[in-house]
């Protein structure tokens, strides 16, 4: 872990509108995450963890406040720059894996590099490397629809890693995995942590309460950090 | 975005979702085939008509009494030739001859050997015919439809006409007219004028109508008025009127198909639009996912545009090619009957391959623009929403 600030969240609010009702999901969130840090956002369903993760990834826009990624306000950037920032600096692992079911493992990982401007040869090299790190290279030609939950998760990890981002965001990464696969996932996380990646995990899984590597647990209740 | 990587993913996506794309291409090809066939047929017919009308006289004068056409006095021709600006006056004798009641009929056209204008018209219709040999006996030139019809009824070389006086008149078949003339000459029998008079019951001083030319097109309107003023029962028609009536007929039939096409296209477009804009569709989720992986709105739009363009081009080329083969090589079976149906003899008209650039462009625009819009508008709407919402 270094002192370099990777993620800065300042006075962040997110409110949803249901008809005339306003439902506040995140309230007054202030958080700083340094390079190489592993942060676990813990809380029950509805506590706002996933929404916070989406705001950090720029997949959603805050009602007020701001999110800075390496000093750049992702929610305020024009689409072209926000997309580029997302492609190069953020790797996202979703709860439901979000793979293209009709594509193979290899192709699913390749997609993340298409907008990067790299040549196909470089893309193939990077994809192979990511598949090795995620320990899924042996299934690279298999269609995503034919993978087990654990294999889908490892494919999603490879896809998140392929652009060599500094930040890895994981949304309920073990919610659809059995215990063995969950432990395997944590092993990979440890590997990423050693590689110096900044990791933010939103989870309610008790497995993350006592990780074998240095991590910060941030509890969330009713849209607030407590 | 690297072009190679982009095309790699595009071809991959097209291949991996081939059943989806093939079904869209299949429907598109059917729609395009129908539209192209109709436009090819109407442009080919228009061309044939224009070519045929080019050699026709500019004006036709006939006599109408009591609202019906009666024989025209041959001496009207002398008065017409005296009008300044009129040239190439020729008289014609023609009429319908019914083979048997309720069966086919032939159009008998009598040509005057002594009239230079009739001579010229005939020569342009049948380049290789020896005119002198033709006029030397009781002979006729027949359209392809007539020839086929007579052959089917065992009149191989000649036909016995029954004159109004109850006498039989045997006329030999001299030659069959070329198939290019089938649009107007399919059921035609061309014979010397005296022979036509005998068969149709005209007196020697009577003709069916008189034709003439007016080389200066600016005088056509004035000439119509001037000629009409000669006799109260004189009826005059110019070539433009004939052309308009034919065009109206073919445009009407083509228009019906165009409406049918637009209805089908609108339905298809609506289905596509709904598929792409469905709130929880796979397409929507895929777009959201691409955005989440760092694809910009431009990247997504460019990708979907190119994907759609490939589908559109393949469909367009296939649809137009199949229509070309169907119309110009196979002769448009079934569809030809819609355009040429109602003729009393079966017409073996073959369509002259006329494909002009404007027709091809019209087909492409009529099809491609609504298709691309039906895909891109919902894709753009999904792209500009937050990826998280799109992925729900």
Image (cartoon, rainbow, N blue to C red):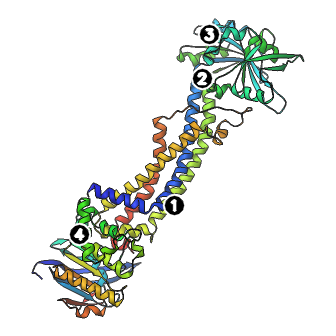
Foreground tag (4 vs 1): 4
Instruction: State the image quarter where residue B150 is shown.
Output: top right
In space, the residues marked 3 and 4 are separated at their CA atoms by 85 Å
Q: Secondary structure at mark 3?
A: strand
Residue sitting at x 62%, y 12%: B120
Extreme residue in the right direction: B166
Labels 2 and 4 share a subunit: no
What secondary structure is marked by label 4? Answer: loop
A13 shown above or below B69: below
Residue identified by numbered label 4: A163
Towards the viewer: A35 or B253: A35
Pointers 1 and 3 within a single chain: yes
Of all residues, the one furthest to the left in this rendering is A3
Q: CA distance from mark 1 to mark 2?
A: 45 Å
Q: Comparing marks 1 and 3, which lies closer to the viewer?
A: 1
Camera-side residue of A112 and A147:
A147
**Mark 2 or 4, which is nearer the eye?**
4
The crowding category of the residue bearing disc 2, from other C-alpha atoms within 10 Å (few below 14, some 14 to 19, many at least 20), is some
Q: Which residue, given by chain and number where applicable, does mark 1 sit on?
A: B271
Who is closer to the viewer here, B173 or A171? B173
Q: Residues within 10 Å of mark 3 (few under 14, many from 20)?
A: some
Q: Quadrant of the N terminus of chain B?
A: bottom left
Q: Which residue is mark 3?
A: B88
Label 1: chain letter: B
Q: Label 4: few (<14), some or many (≥20) within 10 Å?
A: many
Q: Which residue is mark 2?
A: B53
Secondary element under disc 1, as helix, strand or loop, is helix
* Marks 2 and 4 close (CB-CB < 8 Å): no
């Amino acid at each position: 872990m270094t002192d370099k600030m990777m993620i800065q969240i300042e006075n962040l609010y997110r409110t949803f509108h249901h008809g005339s009702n306003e439902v506040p999901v995140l309230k007054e969130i202030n958080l700083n995450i340094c390079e190489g840090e592993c942060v676990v956002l813990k809380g029950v369903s509805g506590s706002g963890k996933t929404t916070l993760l989406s705001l950090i990834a720029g997949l959603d826009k805050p009602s007020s406040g701001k999110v800075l990624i390496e000093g750049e306000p992702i929610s305020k950037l024009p689409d072209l720059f926000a997309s580029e920032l997302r492609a190069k600096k953020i790797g996202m692992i979703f709860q439901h894996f979000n793979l293209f079911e009709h594509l193979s493992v290899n192709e699913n990982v390749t997609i993340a590099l298409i907008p990067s401007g790299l040549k196909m040869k470089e893309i193939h090299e990077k994809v192979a490397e990511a598949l090795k790190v995620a320990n899924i290279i042996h299934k690279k030609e298999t269609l995503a629809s034919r993978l087990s939950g654990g294999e889908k998760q490892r494919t999603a990890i490879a896809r998140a890693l392929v652009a060599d981002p500094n930040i890895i965001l994981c949304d309920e990464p073990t919610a659809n995995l059995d215990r063995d696969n969950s432990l395997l996932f944590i092993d990979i996380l440890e590997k990423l942590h050693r590689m110096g990646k900044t990791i933010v995990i939103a989870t309610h899984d008790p497995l993350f309460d006592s990780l074998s590597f240095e991590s910060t647990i941030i509890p969330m209740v009713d849209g607030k950090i407590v | 975005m690297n072009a190679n990587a982009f095309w790699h993913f595009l071809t991959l996506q097209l291949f991996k979702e081939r059943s989806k794309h093939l079904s869209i291409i299949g429907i598109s090809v059917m729609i395009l085939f129908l539209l192209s066939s109709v436009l090819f047929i109407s442009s080919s017919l228009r061309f044939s008509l224009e070519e045929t009308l080019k050699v026709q006289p500019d004006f036709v004068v006939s006599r109408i009494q009591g609202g019906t056409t009666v024989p025209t006095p041959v001496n009207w021709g002398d008065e017409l030739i005296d009008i300044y600006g009129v040239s190439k006056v020729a008289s014609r004798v023609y009429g319908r001859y019914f083979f048997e009641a309720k069966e086919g009929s032939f159009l008998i056209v009598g040509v005057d050997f002594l009239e230079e204008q009739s001579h010229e018209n005939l020569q342009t219709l049948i380049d290789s015919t020896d005119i002198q040999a033709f006029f030397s006996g009781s002979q006729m030139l027949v359209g392809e439809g007539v020839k086929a019809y007579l052959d089917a009824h065992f009149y191989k070389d000649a036909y016995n006409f029954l004159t109004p006086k109850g006498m039989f008149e045997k006329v030999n078949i001299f030659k069959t007219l070329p198939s290019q003339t089938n649009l107007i000459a399919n059921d035609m029998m061309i014979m010397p004028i005296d022979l036509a008079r005998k068969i149709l019951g005209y007196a020697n001083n009577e003709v069916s109508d008189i034709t003439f030319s007016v080389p200066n097109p600016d005088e056509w309107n004035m000439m119509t008025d001037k000629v009409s003023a000669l006799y109260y029962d004189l009826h005059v028609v110019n070539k433009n009127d004939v052309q308009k009536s034919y065009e109206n007929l073919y445009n009407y039939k083509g228009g019906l198909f165009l409406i049918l096409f637009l209805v089908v296209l609108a339905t298809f477009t609506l289905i596509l639009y709904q598929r792409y804009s469905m709130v929880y569709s796979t397409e929507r989720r895929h777009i959201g996912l691409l955005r989440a992986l760092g694809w910009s709105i431009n990247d997504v739009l460019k990708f979907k545009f190119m994907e759609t363009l490939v589908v559109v081009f393949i469909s367009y080329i296939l649809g137009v090619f199949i229509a070309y083969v169907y119309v110009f090589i196979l002769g448009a079976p079934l569809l030809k009957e819609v355009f040429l149906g109602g003729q009393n003899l079966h017409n073996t008209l073959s369509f002259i391959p006329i494909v002009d650039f404007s027709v091809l462009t019209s087909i492409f625009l009529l099809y491609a623009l609504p298709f691309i819009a039906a895909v891109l508008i919902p894709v753009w709407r999904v792209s500009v929403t937050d990826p998280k919402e799109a992925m729900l």
